[in-house]
Amino acid sequence: MVLQRVKGNVSDAIFSGTCTSTGALKARVTRDGKTLKGMAGVVVGKAARGKFDGRLKGLAVGGPYDVELWIEGAGGKPAEKLAVSEVLVGDVWIMGGQSNMQGCGRTAGLPKADSNVRAFYMNDTWGVAKDPIHNMWLAVDQVHADLNGGANPPPPAKHWGAGPGVSFGDAMYRSTGVPQGLIACGHGGTSMAQWDPALKKLGSRSLYGATIRRFRKNGSKVAGIGWYQGCSDANKDAAAVYTPRMKKLVAAFRRDCRNPRLPIVVVQIGRVIGWGESTPWNSVQDQQRLLSKAIPQCRVVPAVDLPLDDNIHLSGPGQWTLGQRMAKAMLTLTGASREREITYAGAEVVKDPMFGFANVAVKLDGVIGKLQAAGSPRGFEITDNTGTAYVYRVDLDGSRAMLRTCLQPGEVNGRLLHYGLGTNPSCTITDGSGRSIPVMGPIVIGGKPVAVTPYVTKLRISDLLPSAGKLESLACPDTSTVKLEVRDYGQAFCNRHEEFAARTPDDVLAYYACRIACAEPMKLVVGLGYDGPVKAWMDGKQIAHDPAGINPATIDKLKAPVAVAAGEHELVVALASNHGRAWGVFLRFHRTDVPARLIKKGPDSYAMPEILG
């Protein structure tokens, strides 16, 4: 076994057990057959009423040691004996969570950990760490059988069961030089509700209770926790309370382990294929990204770029890489390393010098070396509230990623930035140390998120009509008498330039009209882009007029506020051709009375105008 070292790099292990004798509990500790000084028969506890309690202090880091315990009987002779061999002193870690911690990757071809890396297997025995360390088919805690329908699951197929624990222990041993112990506590498919520390009272019939039992059985001291869980909470209800549940769990571990700064490394859930709705999955990932700000002595490790062995479980090589990443993160928490997490540090809109479009420079902190990718850098995206994506290329520059779009500079504010959008994204960007950028988003660019419809691409349009000059005296037409035909432009810009140009040098007029349906009263802004004199009416009432409209037609050049009741409404826009120089219009609707928290949740959380045409 491995006992946790304390200050001074020595053991201080609390232990207990059952017995039939009463008297002083003594110990002899040997190494390489030689008794350690002061350990030839030292009193380490006592036995009474069928139970013994002891405390083994002062064993230096390393080993292995052989420990002989006995209860002193009449005449100083041993009344009962117990021998424990191969005892190491170093660092011990709780490895908890669900299936990716339990281990579902292929084991064939993976490196072997050093023999100084040990595991406390689920049948309550210690041995050299070798996957699968979660030998669930032999688990002694009843909760594992209960969660499997009443009986422990069968052993996995040959060469299956790789998790991150063995690699983590191996990397920690190579970095620290002290023995490592892994207490296997994960169980596949489990949720935060099932890990609720309030269930500790159920003892071995609860996940948390079983973990604490195993902690106490191994000296009641550990160095920290490795945690990989969250997939089972990627649903609407559970995702909404993921962070408070995680804070509650960590607080309970720190209380029961009697260490208020017990370090924890959390793995950010990676990819899944065939999951369905992506919003709760991304929500859990983004909450995990922010855990290091919400929980002291916590670091988060991404897994989104790692390969899979099925639709949701990391491959064996992916698990080995993850364990190495977890060790790097844990070393920062223990003070052995100064590497920082890769974190989002802001986004700046940069006008493209050649085309005038908006590029978005995403700055990341904590990057080691510079950002890099094998092949094309992929993973970043900018969307609007409808999910429409706008990034066509990503260029890397040191610790910045330049996201290139065809948006106008004024269009970017309020858009949503993501890395790893969806449940199965292609994320290829790492830093010089091989660490992935964490999944992030939605992050609002430039402040407040916006609720906006897609551009209206299908309108009813008029023939070209006689000029009305700058439109000052133009009244709203009666669309029941004006001839209008439906035209689907298939793009954001509703372009009539060829028709206008054919009438040059005449100045002519064209109407655009569309109907909208509102499920409830709404405060809207009509966003118009145009390049000639323009006028607009909602339900026959004038809402906008720009007699000096000229090129270019930019997005939302004019924003006209209007409050509408529930039901159908009609918008009419008049555009003068400006003697053939005008081209057309952009049109979309913003809703301004939706709380930002609902916009961030996604379009299913609030109503928008329905474009009827």
Image: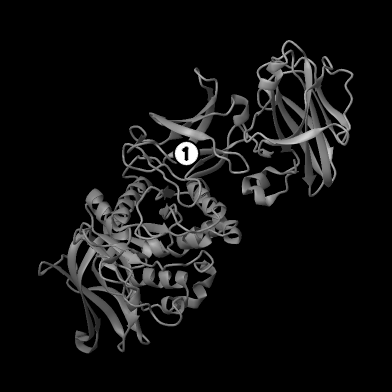
The residue singled out by tag 1 in the image is: 380
Tell me if 185 is positioned left or right of 320 in this view.
right
Of the pair 17 and 288, the residue shown nearer to us = 288
Whether 289 is drawn above or below 66: the answer is: above
Q: Is residue 370 left or right of residue 190?
A: left
Looking at this view, is 245 or 515 the one in front?
A: 515
| Residue appearing at x 50%, y 39% in the figure | 381
Q: Quadrant of residue 490?
A: top right
Residue 307 as seen in the image, left or right of residue 455? left
Where 294 falls versus 403 (above or below)?
Answer: below
Q: Choose between 175 and 525: the one closer to the eye.
A: 525
Q: Residue 363, image x and y in percent?
A: 47, 31
Pick out the residue farthest to the top. 505
Up/down of 508 relative to 524, above or below = above
Q: How many marks?
A: 1
Name the kind of residue labelled 1 in the image: Phe
SS at badge 1? strand
Q: In terms of image quadrants, where is residue 543?
A: top right
Position of 274 with respect to 40 (left or right) is right
View extreme (front): residue: 502
Query: Label 1: how many residues lie within 10 Å, few (<14), some (14-19) or many (20+)?
Result: many
- Residue 221, image x, y percentages: 36, 63
Q: Position of residue 228 (x, y in %)?
A: 42, 58
> Measured along the vertical axis of the image, is residue 436 above or below residue 76?
above
Q: Residue at x 51, y 21 (%)?
A: 352
**Quadrant of image for the N terminus:** bottom left
Q: Residue at x 40, y 64 (%)?
A: 99
Quarter of the figure with the C terminus: top right
Q: Position of residue 281 (x, y in %)?
A: 52, 54
Residue 57 seen in this snapshot: no
Q: Is residue 526 visible?
A: yes
